[in-house]
Image (cartoon, rainbow, N blue to C red):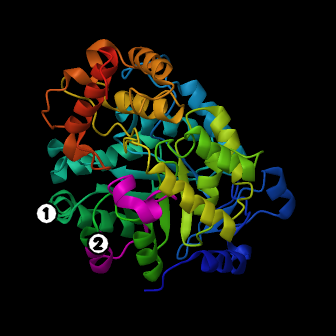
Amino acid sequence: MEKINRRSFIKNVTAGAAAVTAVAAVGCKPGEQKSASEEKQLGEMSHRVHNTSGDVVSLLGYGGMRWPTVGSGRNAPLDQEEINRLIDYAYNHGVNYYDTSPRYCQGHSEEAMGIALSKYPRNTYFIATKLSNMSPGDMSFEASKRMYENSFKFLQVDYIDYYLLHNIQGIAQFQQRFIDNGMLDYLKKEKEAGRIRHLGFSFHGNKECFDYLIDNYTWDFVQIQMNYMDYRNGQRASGNVDGEYVYNRLAEKNTQAIIMEPLLGGRLSSMVPPLTERLKAQRPDRSVASWAFRFLGSFPNILTILSGMTYMEHLVENVETFSPIEPCSEDDFALLEDIAKAILDYPMINCNYCNYCMPCPYGLDIPGIFQNYNKCINEGQFAFSSHDENYKKARRAFLVNYDRAVPTERQAKHCIGCRQCVPECPQRINIPATMQMVDDYVEKLKQNLEF
């Protein structure tokens, strides 16, 4: 297998520029390209072409995992008006790939996306959703088929462009969810009937499972977790297979990759000040997040890069980064490798805040606890030792932020270690042990103990 190194990144991107740079697809039929004047009007969004169907897909894809809500709290309803506004902006600036799942936003993401996109001609955007039959009650053929059929209803469509077998983590799990119940055979027939245009899967497993899936089955695309942290440090950064390995295996099969978690749940958009300063020194007018997107945009076998943009300012910033994307130089790749190694020196929790672990049967806010912990590290409000020069300031800041971010009754101290959440985590976090670690740290701060 030929490995893709920095020099070949640049060579491939340059050689393929005519095929993968700005082709505005909004208002186009799949495979159709806009004129140069129309491209400019839409912000010159970079696009890639699907290698078998000819779909012209925006390199920036919109992920529907983290839609805005009205108010705060887990049960807060989605803010449909703001979702409409976000999708309007994305659509009108060249974004034409929209990804969702029956599981996102407590089951409301598909419906919200369907409402927001329903005003636009169906042949001007691509919908991706998933068979998220991960709970035991969803794995039968009848329940899985019902989930599949509901997606059409909620999305208000009569065909799905990109359909995924969701969150495959192991061979036995794959067999149970898609083979033993006959669902994969059923979905293949649905593809033949035209109700599915492309069939693929999203992956959070080990090498053995990944090799089994792509060596024994034919896929139209595969969705993988990849970013400059996971690329060569997958096991340490997120517990996943290195992105380099899965990307190269897909390139070998001429199967295009769709990228999830390009920012590791936001961890690559906000980081400790010394690392932020290194990136800002090179590109003062660009965001920290833009580096992660440019890294991925340098790989020619990537079809689209998903970003779950909750806020308008993030959407506007990301559209600018992709309009058009500027591939990384060799010096950029070297810098990002150094940044990735440096991030690993900080005691971050490898949580992407996907909420797959929720709801906790005891009411704990697992993602909120982990997010606050990581946020305090990134913002310099974390005491690594009671002997740190800034210990008193960091101690107070952490405790105040923790109480503000997570209600007392939902904090880590209430975890009983039931482990119901553990198999749900795509990042393979030992959640009870990590909750205990957070609680131990909080108690040391509260009691002002030496550590």
Q: Is residue 150 magenta?
A: no
Q: Is residue 233 magenta?
A: yes
- Residue 10 percent across, percent down from the top left: 67, 75
**Which of 438/449 is in front?**
449
Q: Could you tell whether 169 is left or right of 85 in the image?
A: left
Marks 2,1: beta carbons within 8 A: no
Q: Residue 432 occupies which quadrant of the picture?
A: top left
Judged from this view, the residue extending furthest toward the bottom is: 1
- Residue 214 percent across, percent down from the top left: 33, 75
Kindly identify which residue carries mark 1.
180
Kindly identify which residue carries mark 2.
213
Q: Is residue 357 visible?
A: yes
Q: Could you tell whether 283 is left or right of 271 in the image?
A: right
Q: Is residue 297 visible?
A: no
Q: Could you tell whether 51 is left or right of 353 in the image?
A: right
Mark 2: amino acid: Leu
